[in-house]
Image (cartoon, rainbow, N blue to C red):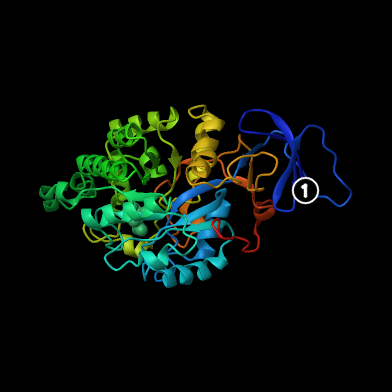
Amino acid sequence: MLITDATLPDGRTRDVRIDGETIAEVGELLSTTADERSIDASGKRLLPGMIDVHVHFRQPGYSHKETWASGSKSAAAGGVTTVVDQPNTEPPTTDGERFDEKAALAADSLVDFGINGGVTEQWVPETLFERPLFALGEVFLADSTGNMGIDADLFADAVSRASERGVTVTVHAEDATQFNDSARERDDADAWSAYRTPQAEIDAVRRACTVASEHDARIHVAHTSTPEAIDVADDAGMTCEVTPHHLFLSRDDLPELGTFGRMNPPLRRETRRRKVFERVADGTVDVIATDHAPHTREEKDASIWDAPSGVPGVETALPLLLNEAREGTLGYERVRDLTAANPAAIFGLSNKGRIEEGFDADLVLVDPDDPRPIRGEQTHTKCDWTPFEGMDGVFPELTMVRGTVVYEDRHEELFGEPVGRNVRR
Ligand SMILES: NC(=O)N[C@@H](CC(=O)O)C(=O)O
Ligand SMILES: [Zn+2]
Ligand SMILES: [Zn+2]
């Protein structure tokens, strides 16, 4: 296949030849061979597919919320070509056999995937580390969906074992002893933000970084929601990710979102959100990852104390970021780094994340000047709602995983075969 006249993230206009699963050539005035499909990309942007290092595809155990089939369709339609699944499924992914069970289910995936190993009192590190793990994590320092919170000793033990094997530990950093119990008396949606305080995150990130340094280990801090926590991780030489909801939404949105805006860590004040955005724009934040955490409408439609935590996001992250690029608030190279080049570098995916000869042909083609409003009902996750309803997104026209078109939006939407495979095989 030949994609002609595509504008790359750095602004160059180039032709890109794909041979089998890889990018064979990036050049000028390349000519097609007789039997080769050719796509005219003049006026369009070509980006490396997003590597979303934080999703919850819910299988096994909660396939009414999501499956590998539905989640990966949603990913493909949003320009995500690699996902990393988190361990809070049922059963949780805490030993070798459970890893194998999840890996077998992931054969339904349209996009490439990694599978993280979970840490609980019941985990079996010996068998887990024998498997082709993506990373350890997300390791829960406080309870979230799945109630997998662990204590300080087990965390230190996990960090030390991971360090011995050169495995990164992804951390959900909140300290439950710092939650504000007086918020428990309220029943409005903002009470969740008042309860799980910024300080609970900041302190937990600081402690996790200290433990990592003591063990000469590297942690990656999941879903940082405060500028302070981002700075703590950065100062400690660790990496961190920010979710689209903490980047684009704040407590000001909760009157409208209600319990559909409940997640961990929770939405923060608008002043903090702005400072998070600055750190995303200036490169202090390494990665945008979605923490795609689908729950059904019926489940979310409960009191703020009973509703489950989490929002979907895998389909809308890159479109929202590309809309920022369209408006000039983020550059295309920054978007590429946050969504593809940096996650590839941090997690050692040496053949992904860039449009260069020899790299996997994981590609996304978009018309950069054609935004459309995000509609939950049009997304492909089993969770047919979105916290970003009505916001503009620049959606892919075509998504390719190692040379196979897995999503194409022409006259109608077409999905490809489940070609996804474990990136750590
Ligand atoms: N973020 C959330 O609020 N929920 C996640 C779990 C998690 O990432 O903590 C989920 O799996 O539902
Ligand atoms: Zn989490
Ligand atoms: Zn998560």
How many numbered circles are shown? 1
Front position in the image: 171 or 16: 171
Front position in the image: 127 or 122: 127
Q: State left or right for residue 5 relative to residue 281.
A: right
Q: State left or right for residue 72 relative to residue 169.
A: right
The type of residue carrying mark 1 is: Met
Front position in the image: 389 or 246: 246
Residue 58 locus on image (x, y percent): 42, 64
Quarter of the figure with residue 269? top left
- Which quadrant of the render holds ligand 1? bottom left
Q: Residue at x 12, y 50 (%)?
A: 181
Q: Residue at x 37, y 38 (%)?
A: 238
Residue 401 locus on image (x, y percent): 63, 53
Q: State left or right for residue 175 relative to residue 312.
A: left
Residue 108 locus on image (x, y percent): 56, 67
Q: Residue at x 72, y 38 (%)?
A: 41
Instruction: Tell me if residue 176 comes above or below residue 239 in the rendering.
Output: below
- Is residue 93 in view from this perspective? no
- Mark 1 highlights which residue? 1
Question: Label 1's element?
Answer: loop
